[in-house]
Amino acid sequence: MGTTSDQIAHPDRDELELGAVLHALSDPVRLKIVAELAQGEMEHTCGSFALPVTKSTCTHHFKVLREAGVIKQRQQGTTRLNTLRRSDLDARFPGLLDTILHAARTSAGGAEEAAASLTAVAGTMGTSAMRAA
Amino acid sequence: MGTTSDQIAHPDRDELELGAVLHALSDPVRLKIVAELAQGEMEHTCGSFALPVTKSTCTHHFKVLREAGVIKQRQQGTTRLNTLRRSDLDARFPGLLDTILHAARTSAGGAEEAAASLTAVAGTMGTSAMRAA
DNA sequence: CAGCTAGTTTGATGGTTGTCGTACAAAGCG
DNA sequence: CGCTTTGTACGACAACCATCAAACTAGCTG
């Protein structure tokens, strides 16, 4: 492992698999990560997410997302900066990310959100207004 | 159990969970089932699919799809008729099914389908966009 | 340098999943 | 009535997965 040029392994755009992406997004923790990553184009560190899991689990989830091609990870110092691979995803699976993100936004949380879901569907588009303060 | 009045259990429309749907669709066998089910609105028997698994596995996959709310199963004689719950899915997760189906169509099979993918993308877009009206 | 911070690696664990084979049940056909 | 067809139920099993704790690495900082 002496190679200092150790770039973290990311799948190529043509290598993206639908099954892997769907599986990556089927976990609530990972879906939350992606949802948070989707609002704003900036880079997020792993620690900037309020996830209900330990660091090791966090590492695992980010790895799954990265290997599925959903996110890109870039090392900077001790921190790892994560970005959504939106353009690659959109190029390969047009509309998939937005649709899932939208569905997650309108149906996340519990099961009694029917009313809120409806309003959200009708009113919210693209820009995220929900931010836990 | 043996109760003959056993209506097969299906989740209600408001009960559909995004994670469960994504997970159900993340398996290649199940994705193929759904894709085959999606072309034409008719009912398919379980045996009408050319699946590379045994009957028991088939039963399992159909059960997963049913419990995720993706398909509806109706008993008729010894056969079980399966239909896609397209309206329920569309109502709860607008565009999700079409987008995934489209992505599956353009990237399924092998890995060398770039040309077919391009044509399909150019031609069939439009249904998966968000509906504002 | 010592300590802190951010995150990985390893190993373990309990749960889930996809797969199968065999046994079973019900409907229909000879 | 028996046999075939269509599919389920029941274990069983290997693989995988999400999770954690503990040990570790590598930058940054006082």
Image: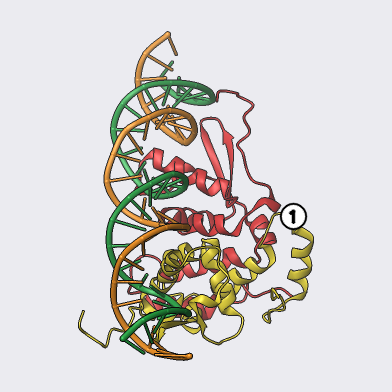
Chain colours: A yellow, B red, C green, D orange
Q: Secondary structure at mark 1?
A: loop
Which amino acid, mark 1?
Answer: Glu
Quadrant that contains the C terminus of chain B: bottom right
Residue A95 position in % (x across, y down) = 56, 75
Q: Is residue B49 above or below residue A46?
A: above
- Count the marks: how many? 1
Q: Is residue B42 above or below residue D2?
A: below
Picture residue at 61% right of the left edge, 55% below the top:
B17
Nearer-the-camera pick, C4 or A29: C4
Q: Chain under label 1? A: A
Q: Is residue A94 visible?
A: no
Q: Is residue B21 above or below residue A125?
A: above
Mark 1: few, some, or many residues within 10 Å (few <14, many ≥20)? few
Give the residue number, with chain letter if any, for mark 1: A112
Nearer-the-camera pick, B123 or A87: A87
Residue D28 position in % (x across, y down) = 43, 90
Q: Is residue B9 left or right of residue A43?
A: right
Residue D26 position in % (x across, y down) = 32, 84
Picture residue at 60% right of the left edge, 23% below the top:
B3
Picture residue at 55% right of the left edge, 25% below the top:
B1
Picture residue at 53% right of the left edge, 49% below the top:
B65
